[in-house]
């Protein structure tokens, strides 16, 4: 993993590469910003051999995000030099990926689109044909002359990239961009011009780049090597028809991706084609391991020797080692883990893997927004990424006494940060362990990858130990106990508790253990045995629990009081995968079911027509949402103490909101 590697005139100090990731950190006209430079600088500082700046448009009508980088003309060159310097000053190679949207500008629209238009004003949605589309159902067909204009646009953008100081250039020949749709057997149908040769567009782009930049300027294209779609090209087709021409062009390294965004059925029934591009929460780790192994063999069979970057769902050190040592890639390409912990390569090299902030693979879209939805890329767990300049730790010369009540995600993040700044901190936690809701949130043994949710509390606990933060467990904090600490600041990170509706017999059922809240049902210490028949009331929080119980062989019914399934806000992007799993398992959400009465072993519900149905069951799990636990705020403020309420104690949301609030407030304590 940490052996140097030479390719195409480049010397990589190790085998870890930050692959192109769209950050949406440009200004409104696509110019690089100080925020962008700081973000990429943090990655370079973390110990990568190369950092590749994400998709940068070669022409404005190909944008797919409002804040997408551009290299349309000479004005953009100087703005990139700060970013290049941040990367190269940290002994890291600097690359940049050049992009043109093609069909993708129609993706993610919330408004009707005119034929051939993207959702950003001035953008177009077109491809080699309109047989298969990605966004706009009425996409246009791109003329031959425009292809030729775009070849020149790519070449000139590559020249500008070299003038800005980048060590190499990458091309986005994948994931539905125009070059990829040209390669596709599905979308490139019926052309009678020279671009009926599906590889020609990519070939001309590389040749024009070499003509303008010199053949010694390294090129690291990112190509789709297998569409994984019915009727699309597969790995053998790529190795037979595209790889020889690619190799003949003298590229430095091949950045391999697999999968397609085109609207055709996936060839693999177990893994959707798009999961090879952007793995979902439940996608197997190192999802492209077998693809890389097969590609390497197919290339060797044809005497083609090209260094390969393998990526997708590498979110822990062992996954990187698997990609390089077992799958046979020359480089491990990392994206998500880069944002969650930019320092992870150095921590691996220094033997500090236990300090890596491993990814939970969830939550970022709940904060800054999705890159396709008016947001910039961030990390649910790492509040510093994208804010490197303003979130620097500045030691205090006036330590404050800070009492943090609650040892969940927000409380621990606040305590660690305040301690690092130099404040006098103590944490009061009523339970016997730190971790809060996140400590049981992943306790689903029959669902894949749920152990990732424990990464965050595990990391926080290690950092609490590293910074020697005093913790008092088993303390039910009261205003008197807190004020006895003589605090300057009290942080209420007390979370939320389950909503218990006023239903006849429910309180007694909870007391006997026949009924449980989801907190009780999921607890890690002495968990209840949810065997037999279980009824879950509340699909928003209870859907994953229902799937887990069913997969474990239990009988389960999932009831919902509302007219349709609305996922809890912390579920985020997992919802689509959850709905797919439920559909595959034949598990339905029975809506309009209101609980009216609970007796021993039974519960009575009414439907939308007020008809009663009494169900027999072994357990009833109540999942009716969460209510903030912040009753201590009023008496503490009455005592003239500064009180900060964070996380679910402010409003039930995701653990990511708690972490980001804590990080901001701790850094802004009065000095």
Image: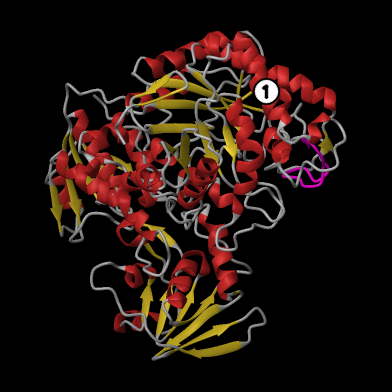
In percent of width and height, residue 449 lies at 40, 58
Please name the predominant secondary structure of the magenta segment in the image. loop
Question: Which element carries disc 1, helix, strand or loop?
Answer: helix
Which part of the image, by quadrant, shows the C terminus? top left
Residue furthest right as drawn: 192
- Residue lying at 76% horizontally and 44% vertically, measured from the top left: 187
The answer to whether one can see residue 153 in this image is yes
Closer to the camera, 182 or 308?
308
Residue appearing at x 16%, y 45% in the figure: 483
The picture quadrant where one finds residue 90 is: top left
Give the tally of numbered discs.
1
Tell me if 615 is positioned left or right of 524 in this view.
right
Quadrant assignment, res 109: top right
Q: Position of residue 663 (x, y in %)?
A: 33, 36
Q: Position of residue 604 (x, y in %)?
A: 51, 87
Q: Quadrant of the N terminus?
A: top left
Tell me, yes or no, if residue 640 can be seen here: no
Instruction: State which quadrant residue 88 falls in.
Output: top left
In magenta segment, residue 507: no
> How many neighbours does mark 1 have within 10 angstroms: few (below 14), some (14-19), or many (20 or more)?
many
Scheme of colours in the image? secondary structure
Q: Which residues are magenta?
A: 125-138
Q: Residue 91 location in percent, x, y?
A: 34, 18
* Residue that appears at 61% across and 74% down: 591
Side of 382 where 588 appears, left or right:
right
Per the image, the residue denoted by label 1 is: 205
Check the image and report above or below for 600 versus 222: below
Front residue of 258 and 412: 258
- Residue at the spot 45% in from the left edge and 18% down from the top edge: 9
- Check the image and report above or below for 585 versus 426: below
């Amino acid at each position: 993993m940490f052996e140097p590697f030479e390719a195409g005139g480049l010397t990589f100090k190790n085998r870890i590469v930050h692959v192109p990731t769209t950050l949406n950190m440009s200004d409104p006209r696509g110019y690089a910003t100080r925020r962008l430079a700081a973000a990429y600088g943090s990655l370079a500082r973390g110990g990568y051999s190369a950092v590749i700046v994400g998709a940068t448009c070669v022409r404005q009508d190909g944008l797919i995000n409002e804040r997408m980088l551009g290299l349309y003309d000479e004005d953009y060159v100087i703005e990139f030099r700060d970013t290049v310097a941040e990367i190269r000053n940290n002994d890291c190679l600097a690359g940049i990926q050049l992009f043109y949207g093609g069909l993708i500008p129609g993706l993610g629209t919330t408004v009707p689109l005119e034929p051939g238009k993207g959702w950003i004003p001035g953008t177009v949605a077109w491809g080699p044909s309109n047989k298969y589309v990605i966004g706009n159902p009425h996409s246009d067909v791109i003329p031959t002359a425009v292809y030729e204009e775009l070849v020149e646009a790519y070449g000139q953008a590559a020249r500008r990239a070299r003038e800005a100081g980048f060590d190499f250039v990458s091309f986005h020949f994948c994931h539905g961009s125009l070059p990829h749709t040209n390669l596709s057997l599905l979308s490139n149908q019926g052309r009678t011009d020279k671009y009926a040769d599906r590889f020609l567009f990519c070939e001309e782009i590389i040749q024009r780049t070499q003509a303008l930049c010199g053949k010694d300027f390294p090129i690291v294209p990112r190509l789709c090597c297998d569409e994984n779609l019915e009727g699309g090209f597969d790995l053998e087709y790529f190795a037979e028809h595209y790889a020889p021409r690619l190799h003949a062009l003298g590229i430095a390294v091949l950045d391999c991706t697999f999968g397609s965004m085109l609207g055709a059925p996936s060839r693999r029934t177990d893994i959707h084609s798009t999961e090879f591009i952007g793995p979902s929460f439940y996608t197997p780790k190192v999802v492209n391991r077998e693809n890389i192994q097969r590609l390497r063999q197919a290339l060797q069979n044809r005497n083609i020797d090209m260094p390969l970057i393998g990526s997708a769902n590498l979110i822990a050190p062992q996954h990187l080692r698997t990609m390089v040592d077992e799958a046979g890639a020359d480089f491990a390409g990392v994206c998500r883990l880069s944002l969650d912990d930019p320092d992870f390569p150095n921590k691996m090299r220094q033997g500090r893997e236990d300090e890596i902030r491993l990814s939970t693979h969830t939550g970022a879209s709940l904060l800054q927004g999705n890159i396709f939805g008016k947001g910039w890329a961030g990390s649910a767990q790492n509040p510093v990424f994208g804010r490197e300049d303003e979130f620097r730790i500045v030691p205090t010369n006036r330590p404050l006494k800070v009492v943090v009540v609650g040892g969940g995600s927000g409380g621990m993040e606040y305590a660690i940060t305040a301690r690092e700044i130099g404040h006098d901190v103590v944490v009061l936690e009523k339970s016997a362990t730190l971790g809060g809701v996140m400590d049981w949130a992943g306790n689903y043994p029959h669902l894949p990858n749920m152990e990732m949710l424990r990464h965050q509390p595990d990391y926080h606990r290690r950092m609490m130990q590293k910074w020697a933060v005093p913790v008092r467990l088993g303390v039910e904090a009261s205003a008197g106990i807190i004020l006895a600490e003589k605090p300057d600041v009290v942080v209420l990170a007390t979370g939320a508790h389950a909503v218990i509706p006023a239903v006849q017999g429910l309180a007694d059922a909870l007391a006997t253990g026949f009924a449980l809240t989801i907190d009780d049902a999921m607890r890690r210490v002495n968990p209840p045995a949810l065997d037999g028949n279980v009824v879950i009331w509340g699909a928003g929080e209870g859907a994953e629990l229902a799937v887990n119980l069913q997969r474990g062989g239990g009988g389960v019914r999932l009831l919902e009081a509302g007219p349709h399934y609305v996922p809890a806000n912390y579920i985020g992007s997992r919802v689509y995968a959850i709905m797919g799993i439920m559909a595959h398992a034949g598990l339905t959400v029975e809506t309009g079911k209101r609980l009216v009465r609970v007796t021993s072993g039974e519960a009575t519900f009414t439907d939308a027509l007020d008809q009663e149905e009494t169900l027999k069951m072994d357990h009833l799990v109540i999942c009716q949402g969460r209510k903030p636990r912040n009753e201590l705020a009023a008496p503490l403020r009455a005592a003239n103490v500064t009180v900060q309420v964070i996380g679910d104690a402010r409003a039930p949301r995701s653990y990511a909101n708690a972490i980001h609030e804590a990080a901001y407030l701790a850094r802004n304590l009065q000095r």
